[in-house]
Amino acid sequence: MKNIDSYTHVRGESVYLDDIPLQAGTLFAAVYDSPVAHGKIKSLDTSEAEKAEGVVRIFTSKDIPGENQIGGIIPDEELLAGTHVHFCGMPVALVVAESDDAARAAVKRIKIEIENLPVITNPREAKEKGELIIPPRTFRLGDTDNTWKNCEYIFEGRTETNGQEHLYIETQGAYAMPQENGAIRIYSSTQGPTVVQRTAARVLNMPMNKIEVDTTRLGGGFGGKEDQATTWAVMCALASYHVKKPVKYCLHRMEDMRMTGKRHPYSSDFKIGLNKDLKILAYEATFYQNAGAAADLSPAVMERTLFHCTNSYFVPNVTATAYSCRTNLPPNTAFRGFGGPQGMFVIEAAIAKAAEQLHIPASEIQQKNLLKTGDEFPYGQIAESEANECWSKTDELYNIEQLEKDVADFNSSNKFYKKGMALMPICFGISFTKTFMNQARSLVHVYTDGSVGISTAAVEMGQGVNTKLLQVAAKIFSVAQEKIKVNSANTWRIANTSPTAASAAADLNGKATALACETILQRMKQVAADELKTSTETIEIKDEIVFITGKKTDLSWKKLAMLTHMKRISLSELAHYTAPGIHFDTSKEKGHPFAYHVYGTAVITVTIDCLRGIYEFDSVKAVHDFGQSMNTMVDMGQCEGGIVQGIGWMTMEELLYNKEGKLMTNALSTYKVPDIYSVPKEIIVHPLKTEKENLAIFNSKAVGEPPLMYGIGAYFALRNAVKAFNSSAVIPYDAPMTPEKVLMNLFSQ
Ligand code: MTE
Ligand code: LUZ
Ligand code: MOS
């Protein structure tokens, strides 16, 4: 089945935030943000701006009727700066004007005097100075201290991974409008309508029931709108509350790049110990997460780094410690993988270092240490592993040895072009790591003409969740897809929701939808049985026709819907789903946090031009654990997108903040993202065949985030290619491996 949005997408008819027809009297907002990264506000002068043409009003922190607080996990982030600014781009004032242009012109006339305070951009420096968002956490398995003496080989090192701009095609935005009796409706380009609702209520000192948040779809979120869509939505609500008119704000690209947080950069240390058979006996890692100026989702991101610090390997002795370090950068936030990729990079670097020192391919160490079913993760969960299955299928399909030989042959017969390859196994846990968040509700209505409406909190952001929800209802009711409509995510229909995140939206909302559909179907079958004077067990509904023990009847789905209603039986259901069996005890750092894991293996090959430092990815060939994919086209799309986004993070996208904490790469002219020319020439994703049961919707495993982590292999493939040209290069484990760094390393001594 095609993505149900493809028709309107192709015709340009899909409605994004900026396409919502304007209400008469709509005003436009723009933010004045801090020009410096840390300081005390001595004066703020908005008088010139207030006089500017079209300006209606300018808001500062003094205009907030409730709490000036948007921090979700920790209350440490102001909506509008009060006395201090903590990062370059921190909102200070909000201009509301009659047009978008007038609002932005007025912003330029605001003057501020700031007494500068010391700026920290480096997480290790922040940790030294005691600037931690939360106390450090350590995950432990076995006993590393007493294992080093048993290790034949021990390697230590340091790694850096940089951040990543989300670059959703639709920038952040919101549109708030006053309703009767002081209520407010907010259209928001958010992954988390409830987060927006809760925060608006807090800032406006209003009950949540007076705030309606509605989200039709996003032009991409990638985690960047899990928490950080809230700011703009609450600002529009604040202005609308005061001026009693609709207020809209869509950020320009440079405003968005400057003011919003990104993937967390990490600086990390590792120590790995192996025995002579290359079994990893011990692994220690210390992670310094660059959280930025406020907590945002950093504590949860940090936690996932620890969960994924051993990737898809079994290591019997592990000590992993993470620090969430407060710096003067915009608060960093969720980004596809949510700290997992940062943790996985470090163990891949440790393995690569061991392999380089031992003069063997990293794949030898990788394969020997893959998780088996029954192995224990450092957090106590027992693996149901597909790691070996994915690896062997990769070998069977793509012939790893032959690929290695081809690369070696190419390298020995070419002087100025070199190839490199790397394998990248992945393992990603599916569930919000905060157990309580793994719940969802679905409201299903069958109308008397047999058409169906579904409402959940799932936010469509291009990942195809609406298509999957529709498939759930179509399959359970056995009705045509045209009969079903998936509605916008709206806090008045579905309350107290988790954001669409953690790759879990299709599972959680799909399972809730399945429950609701089953309940309604059961009632309708009862009505059919009564009508046809038989028992419900004999009734089946297939392709909108009622059957009795396999024999067609005259009763259609449509007639049955009306009949059910005439019998005064409900055709509606609100179902609640919670993922069973998951728990985690943070006092012990042990439990069973994930409903299941997703596995896979990719092999990545790259060719570098050794005179120029530029490169092309020849291929990414993967075997991916989809479980039993319910929509191959959608899932393949997620794999391709994730792979390219991961390669971008690892090889091209280079965020640069200067010492004053100013983002230098603040536009697409200076921040390079993958385009059609830089995607691998070939991407093959083969589904791992499996009949196993799991907790995914229809056994179709979550696919949103895991494929991004194949991109980590791109970094190691590039390293290997550089080494093939310059075997004495000492390359730091520092991502992204940009063409500039490739060139420097090709000719380093
Ligand atoms: N795919 C597209 N096209 N656009 C997106 O914004 N976000 C990713 C992933 N795939 C994203 C995407 C992220 S970060 C997550 S968590 C999942 O989709 C969320 O959706 P799911 O739970 O339905 O997989
Ligand atoms: N968001 C969140 C996430 O709040 N908790 C998570 O565990 C998570 N994991 C991945 C992506 N977003
Ligand atoms: Mo995705 S990082 O869970 O929004």
Image (cartoon, rainbow, N blue to C red):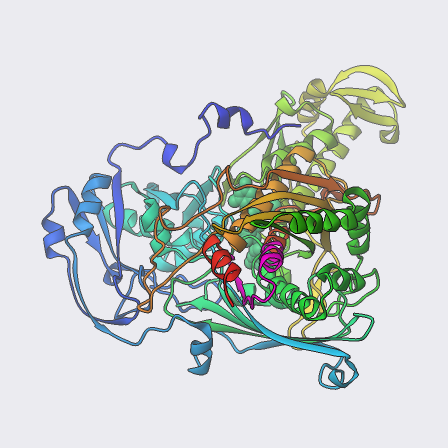
Above or below — where is 277 with respect to 151? above
Q: Where is residue 707 in the image (x, y as percent from the top left)?
A: 64, 48
Front-most of residues 3 and 457: 3
Q: Quadrant of residue 467?
A: top right
Residue at figure coordinates x 78%, y 64% from the top left:
369
Side of 389 where 583 appears, left or right: left
Q: Quadrant of residue 27?
A: top left
Side of 522 where 669 appears, left or right: left
Side of 502 where 250 appears, left or right: left
Q: Position of residue 515 (x, y in %)?
A: 71, 42
Front-most of residues 572 and 194: 194
Q: How many labels does the image show?
A: 0
Residue 253 seen in render:
yes
Residue 694 seen in render:
no
Q: Quick check: is 719 in the magenta stretch?
A: yes
Front-most of residues 574 and 285: 285
Outermost residue on the right side: it is 549
Above or below — where is 455 with respect to 669? above
Residue stretch in magenta: 716-737
Residue at figure coordinates x 55%, y 27% from the top left:
6
Above or below — where is 402 with respect to 133? above
Q: Where is residue 534 in the image (x, y as percent from the top left)?
A: 88, 24
Q: Please identify the quadrant where the N terminus is shown.
A: top right
Residue at figure coordinates x 74%, y 67% from the top left:
377
Above or below — where is 404 with respect to 350? above
Q: In which quarter of the image is ligand 2?
A: bottom right
